[in-house]
Image (spheres, rainbow, N blue to C red):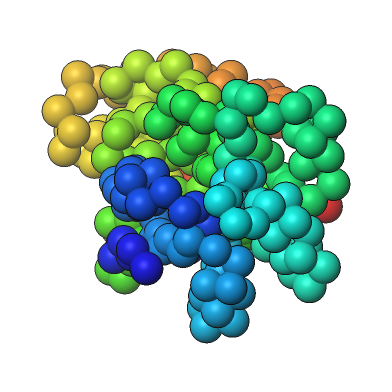
């Protein structure tokens, strides 16, 4: 079994191609996830019994087994999310049948960024909001932060939207959002926001904060005039709120 050592969401890969498993483990590990790989259904069942996984990546065409059959067997006893990896030669009926057991599917060969975007999108739909790594200390040092249907990737300095694609943020917009999410549920004055943003070498001024707030609200709020995340505290500043229902399915 090949394993990655990063903390975060746990992904189990079921594929009998060692090279593909190594590629997937490296890809998931570099994105801040824990990954393990197995080559068949028996090993998959043992792994699931031994550890709790947040997502399964199952190859549709294993040499001695049918990936769709394995996915169906998992679905009979578990609601763990499943992404199926298919080949271009797989017929349409079989791919359509994946909708009965899988949360998503991706055709090989795939774009690595698309795979990570789809993994993140499925995890956002099925996991509660959380810092993906260590929460200790006054300022989180996690690699990413999940709020609503968005994922803020600190290392890549990218905000991923509900569909898993990057949102267009200017460097100053990202720095302001990063400052806000690293101080959740705290009222921050303009001066405090400016001081924290200067850590990222942002060229911002007092009134620029208000403009950046307006721009961010247009990009992350469903109703910018009644913001859910970035709220104004009159006379005090701004507060980044993480609603209790954030990221949970209705």
Q: Can you give x and y, in whole percent of width and height, for residue 172 in the image?
A: 30, 22
Q: Quadrant of residue 88?
A: top right
**Residue located at (40% from left, 31% from top):** 112
Q: Quadrant of residue 186?
A: bottom left
Comparing 142 with 88, the one in front is 88
**Residue located at (72% from left, 50% from top):** 68
Q: Is residue 19 above or below residue 114?
A: below
Farthest residue to the bottom: give it: 50
Residue 209 falls left or right of residue 214? left
Q: Can you give x and y, in whole percent of width and height, for residue 164 in the image?
A: 55, 31
Which quadrant is home to the N terminus? Answer: bottom left
Residue 48 falls left or right of residue 77? left
**Residue located at (33% from left, 64% from top):** 3
Q: Can you give x and y, in whole percent of width and height, for residue 125 in the image?
A: 67, 48
Count of number-bearing discs: 0
Comparing 57 with 183, the one in front is 57
Comparing 15 with 224, the one in front is 15
Q: Is residue 152 visible?
A: yes
Residue 31 falls left or right of residue 98? left
Q: Is residue 209 visible?
A: no
Q: Quadrant of residue 70?
A: bottom right
Q: Can you give x and y, in whole percent of width and height, for residue 83 in the image?
A: 62, 46
Residue 120 falls left or right of residue 179? right
Q: Is residue 157 above or below residue 85?
A: above
**Residue located at (76% from left, 65% from top):** 73
């Amino acid at each position: 079994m090949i394993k990655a050592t990063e903390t975060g969401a746990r992904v189990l890969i079921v594929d009998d191609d060692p090279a593909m498993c190594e590629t997937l483990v490296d890809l998931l590990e570099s994105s801040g996830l824990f990954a393990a790989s197995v080559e068949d259904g028996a090993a998959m069942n043992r792994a699931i019994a031994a550890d709790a996984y947040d997502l399964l990546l199952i190859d549709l065409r294993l040499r001695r087994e049918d990936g769709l059959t394995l996915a169906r067997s998992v679905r009979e006893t578990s609601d763990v999310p499943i992404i199926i990896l298919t080949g271009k030669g797989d017929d349409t009926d079989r791919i359509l049948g994946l909708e009965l057991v899988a949360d998503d599917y991706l055709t090989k060969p795939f774009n690595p960024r698309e795979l990570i975007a789809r993994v993140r999108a499925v995890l956002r739909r099925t996991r509660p909001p959380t810092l993906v790594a260590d929460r200790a200390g006054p300022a989180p040092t996690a690699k990413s932060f999940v709020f609503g249907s968005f994922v803020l990737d600190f290392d890549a300095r990218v905000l991923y939207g509900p569909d898993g694609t990057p949102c267009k943020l200017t460097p100053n917009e990202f720095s302001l959002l990063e400052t806000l999410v690293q101080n959740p549920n705290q009222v921050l004055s303009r001066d405090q926001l400016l001081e924290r943003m200067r850590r990222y070498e942002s060229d911002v001024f007092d009134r620029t904060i208000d403009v950046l707030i307006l721009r961010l609200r247009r990009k992350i709020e469903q109703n910018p005039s009644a913001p859910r995340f970035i709220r104004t505290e009159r006379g005090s500043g701004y507060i980044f709120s993480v609603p209790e229902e954030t990221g949970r399915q209705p």
